[in-house]
Amino acid sequence: MKAKYHTTTGLVSAGVASMAAVGFGANDASAQGVENWAGFYAGLAVGTRDGSFFRYSDDAYNFQSDPTTGVFVGYNWALGNLLMGVEFAYSPSDIGMEDNGEVSDPDDYSVSDMIDIALRLGAPIGDNVLVYGFGGLSAGTMWHDDGGEGYHTLGMNYGIGIDYLVTESISVGARVTGRNMGIEVGDGMGDGGRESSHELSLRAAFHF
């Protein structure tokens, strides 16, 4: 559990550092760089998700390192030499879970249909590179693999990313997303059910 705690702490620290870099880097951001990133964009993402799920206080499960795929759409607008944006992302990928040896009679679970809504704040470096931090809300569905109904999960997301304009309308990038989510009360999972994960993804987008 300490390793997962340090991972989450590291993501938070990286996010804070990224936001600080955004603030200090704003003086070097060109007006042309800001305009290059302003407007609508949409794209595809592939990655891998890792983390853990605590059904009760001691019963822990780990995510399998399964690949994820998803789509996203967003809008950036200029805020001086900075960029502020909002983004919606969806990943249908079904990520399995396995017990870490602490569960005497483990069940099989998986998580799918991950939805992220986040606010972004970033600064261009030159005309073609954008560094940003983000935070928002996440929701998904946790399935018991016996074919029963799904449990609703809800929580927060946060992270950092970097994008590069390959052409005037196409960009590629990478980002790290952390999520802390809980099981919706009344779903029959019991108090204390929670999920903590991080995801590394590669993204490609078309800018309108």
Image: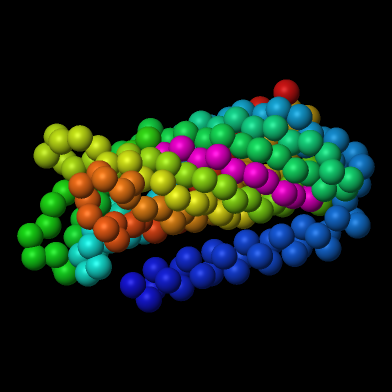
Task: Examine the rendered structure and indicate whether residue 193 appears above or below residue 91.
Answer: below
Secondary structure mainly formed by the magenta segment? strand
Residue 102, position as x, y percentages in the image: 17, 69
Name, please, the residue furthest toward the left: 105
- Residue 199 is inside the magenta segment: no
Residue 118, position as x, y percentages in the image: 59, 43
Q: Is residue 50 visible?
A: no
Residue 204, position as x, y percentages in the image: 60, 35
Q: Is residue 5 visible?
A: yes
Residue shown at 51% from the left, 70% from the top = 9
- Image quadrant where residue 62 sits: bottom left
Task: Examine the rendered structure and indicate whether residue 208 appears above or below residue 36.
Answer: above
- Residue 121 is inside the magenta segment: yes
The number of numbered badges drawn on the structure is: 0
- Image quadrant where residue 139 sits: top left
Residue shown at 61% from the left, 65% from the top = 14
- Extent of the magenta region: 114-124
Residue shown at 27% from the left, 58% from the top = 191
Name, please, the residue furthest toward the top: 208
Name, please, the residue furthest toward the bottom: 2
| Colour scheme | rainbow
Residue shown at 60% from the left, 30% from the top = 73
Q: Is 179 positioned to the left or the right of 167 in the image?
A: left
Residue 25, position as x, y percentages in the image: 83, 59
Q: Quadrant of the N terminus?
A: bottom left
Q: Quadrant of the C terminus?
A: top right
